[in-house]
Image (cartoon, grey):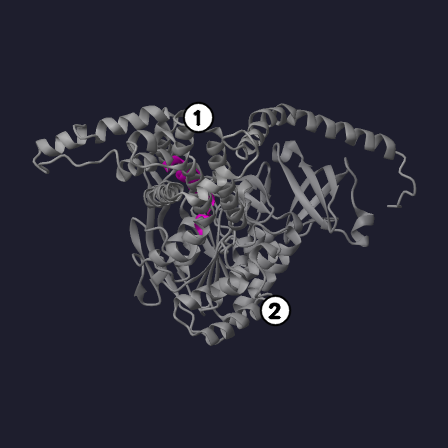
Amino acid sequence: MAVLEHNINEVSLSRLEKRENYTFFGLTVPYLVLVGAMIVIPIGWLFFLSFIGRDGSFSFENYERMINSKAYLRIFLTTFKISLLTTFFCILLGYPLAYFMSQISRKWASLCMIGVLIPFWTSLLVRTYAWLVLLQKKGLINNIAIDLGIITEPIKFVHNTSGTLIGMVHIMLPFLILPLYANMRAIDSHCVKAASSLGATPVRAFWTVFFPLSIPGLLAGSLIVFVLCLGFYVTPAVLGGGRVIMAAMKISSNIELYFSWGAASALGVVLLVVTMIILFIASKLVSLDQLGQRR
Amino acid sequence: MANNALNISIHNVTKTYGDFYALRDVSLDVTSGEFLTLLGPSGSGKTTLLMVLAGFINPDYGSVKFGDEEVVLKPPHLRGIGMVFQNYALFPHMNVEQNVGYPQKLRGVSKENTKISVEEALATVKLDGLGHRQVDELSGGQRQRVALARAIVFKPKILLMDEPLSALDKKLREEMQIELRQLHDRLNITTVYVTHDQKEALTMSDRIAVINDGQLKQLDTPNQIYRSPSNAFIADFIGESSLLSATVKNGIASLGSSKLKGNQKLSKDGDFLLVIRPEKLFIASKKARDANHFEGVVEDSIFQGESQLMVIKLDPKTYGEQSLRMRLPNSSSTLSELPGIGDRVTLGLKIVDSYFVEKSHGGS
């Protein structure tokens, strides 16, 4: 075909293209407004407040207090410890389940998925208090265990770290399983078959082929769980019984008890920045827009 | 790559899923160094049979022997077979070299020897120097070659291939068919190849096992299967053919009111089909003794590049409502003599090319 020296449709084509771009942009406007009003402006306000001292003037005192006070350090350590442990236990429980679900037929897997999703759809508060009912000193589990003679004294399950962990692992588990399962389903089962035809024992085939291919899903799921844990409030507040203090709870008490918006904002900003850093590092490891999906 | 290829004996293998027979009493022997193709339409059981050989499916009954060794219950990783999957099944988290070296690593081969064997395998499939490429940087044809290199790097005595070329475009597929065949001859590996493409099977195989409804329908050389299909299904499935209904009485076949001669003895009376390959028909100027003749009118004439396909409607009075396909090579000499649509023609079919199959046998 001859190359056209002058594209006669050029003007109308570019006009069409422009119109299409405007249409697409128009579709995003409601979301942009929402994000602007609900996220960008409040966070900007938060950021501003964090630099306002008790006397109402500009100061770094909110941040200085955080660096100097042992209490804040402890809160951050607790937050990270609880988040890491929750992520760890979620992987421990979730990976085998997701693997199992990825290996059975789709029909049975969707049944299992309902089992995963029903708690996921149930109110957070309901589930948290349900754990309290089960785990407390005169709760169902302690009573049954004592009746059966397994223990004589009730075990302290709640109002401590273990109670917080039990509740948080339960609530976070679907966030790990959903991306991990999607990733595992996308793994070509022929790859594992190929490995065994080439001489790999089932265990070897799992560790050399299946597991490496499931890492993107595992990272994505762990990341979601970890980041959600960092800012988690309800469950640690109820099941921790005031003994497990995480960052979100300190923010709340700064406002509700001390009316110190500055201190609360500073803590919020630090939590936000830390979360962003973690997300940034993680995005180098796994692309976030592909959560759990293999190329 | 000197290699003692192994023969495979499959005896009375049956596999059911509930009421469905995926394989029904299949017995067949693959001689050592042979290229045997399992050919059948989808759902025929050919892939099931391959998976039985690979060890991924355990049959309900039957025995599978590699050489003298019974392997029917041996897990796949202990069978020592090379296998190429339909979608290649390359490991996406490994580069080409690691993919090909994987079986060697499993076998505890030293790093240096692995490197040597990987290079040798890559050279065999003409991929030298691409060891460091990532799998997703390769074209379909190259991936196919990597999968093949990975399956032969540990010098297996048996190679299984499950429709390895089906994802490639036609031209590349036809090139690879010949290349795979040459590779097989060079490596001397007993090869079992699964395909639904009859032309591919004819091109590549020493022998073809036609499988349908979980049963072995015919096992023969490509030439024999093409010339003398054992039933109507195979006649229809392999190659192009027109099947004309004929009746046999007292050993004599007749088509409508005209008598036919065939190249086989017809000892049974009943309904038969005359298998006519379109390229074996010719336009007869005068009737000869060594041929059957058919009269009809050209209904359609289609230019197809290397040949001209003609549809001839046979005289309904003599033959009933039946039509024939004829394929004439497109050389300049035939082109000028080509009858036009609507012309009356007399077609000839040599008696040696006239072959009958029973009608009742597993129609399609």
Q: Is residue A74 something one can see in this rendering?
A: yes
Say few, some or many: other residues with alpha carbon within 10 Å of mark 2 (under 14 / 14 to 19 / 20 or more): few
Mark in front: 1 vs 2: 1
Judge whether residue A174 is colored magenta.
yes
Residue A199 colored magenta? no
Is residue B233 left or right of A242 when viewed as pictured? right
Q: The disc labelled 2 sits on which kind of residue?
A: Gly
Which is nearer the eye, A187 or B159? A187
Q: Position of residue A6 (x, y in %)?
A: 92, 40
The percent coordinates of residue B26 (x first, y second) are 37, 52
- Percent coordinates x, y for residue B175 in the rendering: 63, 59
Please tell me whether residue B18 is drawn above or below residue A55 in the rendered image. below
User: Which segment did they paint magenta?
Assistant: A173-190
Identify the disc placed on residue A267. none
Q: In the rendered image, which residue does mark 1 sit on?
A: A259
Where residue A2 sits: x, y (%)? 89, 46
**Which residue is tagged 2?**
B129
Displayed quadrant of residue B245: top right
Q: Residues within 10 Å of mark 1 (few under 14, many from 20)?
A: few
Labels 1 and 2 touching (C-beta < 8 A): no
